[in-house]
Amino acid sequence: MSPRYDWQLEAQPESDAITEVATNLKVPPFLARLLIQRKITTPEAYEAFINPDMARLHDPFLLHDMDKAVARIQQAIENQEKITIYGDYDVDGLTASSIMLETLQSMGAEPTVFIPDRFTDGYGPNAAVYRYLQSAGTQLVITVDNGVGGAAVIDAAQAAGMDVVVTDHHELPAVLPQAVAVVHPRHPEGHYPFGGLSGAGVAFKVASALLGAAPVESIDLAAMGTVADLVDLTDENRIIVQMGLAMIRTQPRVGIAALLAAAKIDPATVDETSIGFGIGPRLNALGRLGDANPGVTLLTTFDDAEAQALAQNINDLNAKRQALVQDISKVALEMAQTPENQGRRTLILAHAGWHEGVLGIVASKVVEATGKPTLVLNIAADGQSAKGSGRSVPAFHLFNALNAERAAMTAFGGHGMACGLTVPVANLPKLQAAMEQAAATSLKDQPKPPLAIAARLTTADLTLDHYRAMRQLAPFGNGNPEPTFSLRPDLIDRIKTMGQTNAHLRFVADGAAVVAFGYGDQAQALSQATQVKLAVRLDANTWQGNTSLQLRLCDWQLQAPAVIDWRGPDISAAQFRPALTYVFFDAKRQAKFTRQFQFGGPTVLAQDLAAGTADAVLVDLPSDAAQLDAALAKLSLPVRVMFYAAPAELVALPTRSECAAVLRYLAAHPQFDKHHLPALAKAVHVAVGQAILAVQVFFELGFVTIKGAFIDLAEHPAKKPLQDAAAYQARATFLALAHELQTADRRELEARLTNH
């Protein structure tokens, strides 16, 4: 099995350099190697990297328009103006809103928070909402994690007398809003030293400017938004996340503690993975399935009972979100495998009754499974329009591909890797054509995505101490990737699936436990592989108080056998469910099995095989070697073999004495009706097949005559050995071949079948 990624071994430091860094920094050589690759080689650089210091945060007033933003917000507080914080429904938006809310409250203001509804308000400034806020008395809107793309709405609000301060970090459009202030780390007129802040990070900087010092009590929220929004974990972001995670581990706020408890996460173990895969998805579930405002309430409450109730509701909602994703993904992946879609480089999967809030997640799963840029859309109840999300691969710019047909869409926005859109169902073929046309160029020679390999490990490197040393480089994320290592184990054993749907795999490689998420359907491929090379990350597993090293699989290279052995004494319906091509040598058996079993792929007679047929299963036995070799010549390896035959088909050749008994019985029963051969077989104690073969041999050798249905002994037949009969020879040849194909060990069988 080929790997999913292009493995690229990073430059390996010289042993002398590793020794020098290990000595100077007082770290083990294993960690020294990784530090050198990150260009951290001096005690000063190492100290700054592993120990966060608020003093290294940049001056917030270096951000563009920060002075204007602070002045206008302070004015609003002093004049007791009505302030509305306009946020967003994802984790970054919820944490940014919470930071701004707590900051303004600490300064004596009583702001309100407005979190838009994904389905009715959409992302960012909404004209109708802004008009409502102004009519309700709002005098100042502070956007967090949005606003930079809302020039038309914000300019209209300003003209109508409602001031807006924009704080955002998203991509800058050509036209910026004419707001009171636009605070953005990459503003074209600004000179901020670090452009990678999240929305929560920008809110944290605004809070720092308003308060005159960084609000340490809000750094946990800034860390959560930073991790969840997948911005680079370098520079300020690294400090924010390091300190924020430390705060959550030691003194989590009421709402976060309740959410951790609902997710069954020990606060003391919280890291970037806990946020990214445990807490983040739960908070995001709010906005995906409904109203996200309870997220702000949870993050800012001081009431234990309220926090527990909200956390449990959020946890339940996340379970619903997971079920929706699982159900929709199952249908979407089935749609992706239709013959029409298999022939396409891109996918548009549209279906009625799909929840629009989770379609981005589903699209990501389809892209991961197929490698194809994908749109996943819900068809409205009236059947006229479809709305959903798209995800892509690095080589395919999704926004540009669809932008060519912008006029065919009702609504559209996004970037190279993701998009959201609404489109009339009648125009879906136009979008499919546009995507295929773009793919014909960009995906023509699409390379596999790269996977950086930090080092090649041996079994001796697989220690808990090395894992703990590596964790000094955390938190990991964009800009500071978690190290991936290659490992060529000598022994793979204890392979088993895990998870409610057996979607994941667990096995042991040279004594180290390995978990492989999403590889549950590859257990057989792993067990049959002749060589295995793993790309893994180091992890730890704690069970009943004991902590041990655990490896997480990122990718693998399996050298599959040319022949995959599915032989066995019996057959079951499950063997025919995979999407393979099932090859039969016997037409009668093909007809019988297709009536008896549900096949996951086509059935075909060996004589009708097309050249180059892949993913084939040889179901039954060939009549001779020539028939087998002719079939093998048309197949692409690997080939799966069952070589099934009913027991009656494998009865041995009748012996000389058994043939003599049949002949004596015929002599004693002249004009014997051949339809009564079962009775003859019973009388002389041979199998029916043996009796039939004996009669065929006798007829070929001239020992008997057959006229119509009646068998008689020939007069004065010449003596001939049984082996002279073609029927005898064919049966002997078949049984020898059957014995070879059914009993040879896998290596012998592979040698036989690949040498045709």
Image (cartoon, rainbow, N blue to C red):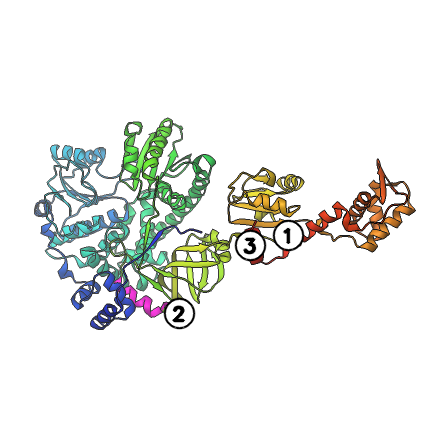
Task: Tell me which secondary structure the magenta stretch mostly adopts.
Answer: helix
Residue 467 lies within the magenta run: yes
For the residue pair 166 and 511, the one nearer the viewer reads as: 511
Upstream in the sequence, badge 3 or badge 1? 1
Q: Is residue 433 left or right of residue 70?
A: right
Q: Is residue 50 above or below residue 686?
A: below
State the image coordinates of residue 750 (x, y, percent, origin top left). Answer: 55, 54
State the image coordinates of residue 230 (x, y, percent, origin top left). Answer: 27, 50
- What is the crowding at mark 1: few (fewer than 14 residues within 10 Å), some, or many (at least 20)? few
Which dot marks residue 570? 1
Q: Which residue is mark 2?
A: 545
Q: CA distance from mark 2 to mark 1?
A: 45 Å
Q: Mark 3 or 2, which is nearer the eye?
A: 3
For the residue pair 309 and 14, the one nearer the viewer reads as: 14
State the image coordinates of residue 546 (x, y, percent, origin top left). Answer: 40, 70
Q: Is residue 735 left or right of residue 58?
A: right
Upstream in the sequence, badge 2 or badge 1? 2
Which dot marks residue 750? 3
| Kind of residue at badge 3 | Glu
Q: Do we see residue 138 in this rendering?
A: yes
